[in-house]
Image (cartoon, coloured by chain):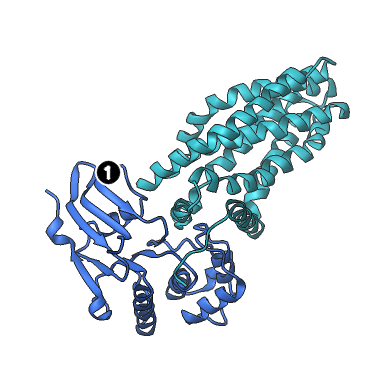
Chain colours: A blue, B cyan
Amino acid sequence: MTTALLEARDLSIHKGLRQLLKDVTLCVEPGDLWQLAGGNGIGKTSLLRSFARLASIEVYGDLSRCDDVLYVGHSAALKGAMTPRQNLKYHPSGLCTPTDTEIDEALAAVGLAGYENALTARLSAGQKRRVALARLFLPSGRLWLLDEPFTALDVAGVAVLEQRFTAHAQAGGAVVFTSHQSADLGDLRSVLDLEQFRGD
Amino acid sequence: MTEARDIDILHYCRSQTVRQLMLMVRSPSEVVNPLLFFLLVIVLFPLGLGPDPEQLSVLAPGILWVVALLSNLMICMRLFVDDLEDGSLEQLAMARVPLSVAVLPQLLASWLASGLLLSVVSPLFGLMLGLPLNVAPVLIASLLMGTAIMLLLGAVGAALTVGVQRGGILLALLILPLYVPILIAGTRALNEALQGGDPSIALALLGAGVTGSLVLAPLAIAEGLRVSLEL
C-alpha cells in the first residue's frame, strides 16, 4: 500500500454565492498522471489552486497532501529584469537550491541553451513558458500541480514535457495538470472530467 | 532526481534577499523616486516658508518626519503589486517556509533601499532646513527605527489591499492612523534633542515599536497576503 500524495474527499468549491464544484473526490498516488478536464469556467484552476492550498476560504471538504509540492500557475512568476538563470536560481518558491550546472542543464532540456543570460523580458511568450517549466527539470517536488502547462508551447515543447511527465511518474512522482489538449501520455494518464462534479 | 532537497531557512532568506536587491538594482527608479520626492519637498519648504533659519529649524522636525512618512507610503503602495501580477507571490506562498518568514527578505531589501538610505542622508536634508548638525545622531536613530516600523505596518496594509484595484487611498486610510504614534514619537525625539532635553524616552518608544512590529507584523502580512491570493 503506497501512501497517497494527495487525497481530496467531498471537496466543494464556491465562488461567492455560486457553487463551482461539489463532492470532488480524488486520490493521487505515486506514478499517477491526472488531467483535470472540462470546459472554460468549470473550475479547473480553482480546483488546482485549492490542491495547492492557495485557495482555502471558499473550499469545503477534506484535503490532505504531501508537503513536497511544485506548483506552476498561469502566471510564470518570472521577472523580466532578470535572466532565466537568475530567475531559476532565486526562485521565490525556494523548493530546491539548484547548482549552476543543474540550471543550465534544465534550460537546455527545455530548448533554451544559449538563452541563459538573455533578459527574460526579451524572450517570446513560449520561451517564457519554457523557463517556467524548466523548474520541472530541476530537483523538484514529488507532486506537481500544473495549470495549463501546454499553453504557448510548440509541438516539440509539448513532446518534451510529456516525456518529462512520464519519467517523473515512473520515478515515483505524480502530476496533476489542467489542459484542454489530450496529451500523449500513454496509459499512465487518467482524466478527471469535472463536468460530473458541476455545482448547483 | 524527484526528491526535493531540504531547504534551509537561512539559505532561503539569503537567496531571496539577493533576488530582491538584484531587482532593485535593475529598476532603480523604485529606489530613487521616494528619495527624490523627499528631496523635492525639503527643497520647496524653505521657498514657501521663507529662508529664516530660526523659523525653519523650529518646523524642521515636523517637516522631516511628515515627508519621511509620505515617502514611506509611496513605497508601501508598490510593495506587493508586481509580485501579485506576475505570480511571484503565489510561489512565495508555495515555499516550504512559513509565509511570515518568506516575506522578510523583501521587507529587508525595501528597508535597506528606503529607510536606511533615507536615514543616512537625512542630516543633509536637516541642514537644508536649518537643523544643527549636533542633532544628527538623534535624527538618524529616530528615522532608522521609525522607517522600519512604518514599513512593517505599511506592509500589513499593502498585503491586505494588493488585490484591490487602485487600492492606494484605501491603503492610506488603513495605515495612516497607525503611523500617528510613530510620527509623534519621532518628532518628539527630535524636538527634545533640539531644545537640549533628553530624547531617550521617545527613542526607547520607537525601539519598542520596532521589536513589537518585527514580531507581530510578519504574521499579519502573511495572513493578509493569503487573503489577497484568494481573489
Q: Is residue A13 above or below residue B183?
A: below
Q: Would residue B51 be found to the left or right of residue B227 on screen?
A: right
Check the image and name the residue furthest to the bottom: A156
Question: Badge 1 sits on which subunit?
Answer: A
Q: Is residue B125 above or below residue A3?
A: above
Residue B200 falls in which quadrant of the image?
top right
Residue closest to the eye, B31 or B144: B144
Residue closest to the eye, B79 or A169: A169
List x then y, in percent, for residue B222: 47, 41
Q: Is residue A50 above or below residue A194?
A: above
Q: Which residue is mark 1?
A: A58
Residue closest to the eye, A69 or B174: A69
Q: Would residue A114 be found to the left or right of residue A133 on screen?
A: right
Say how many tags the image has: 1
Residue closest to the eye, A85 or B142: A85
Residue B140 falls in which quadrant of the image?
top right
Residue at x 63% of width, y 27% of height:
B209
Q: Is residue B22 visible?
A: yes
Give the class, few, some or many, for how many residues have Cα within 10 Å of label 1's Cα (few <14, many ≥20): some
List x then y, in percent, for residue A131: 48, 72
SS at badge 1? loop
Kind of residue at badge 1: Glu
List x then y, in percent, for residue A114: 57, 82
Residue at x 37% of width, y 65% of height:
A144
List x then y, in percent, for residue A14: 22, 46
Residue at x 28% of width, y 50% of height:
A63
Residue at x 25% of width, y 74% of height:
A189
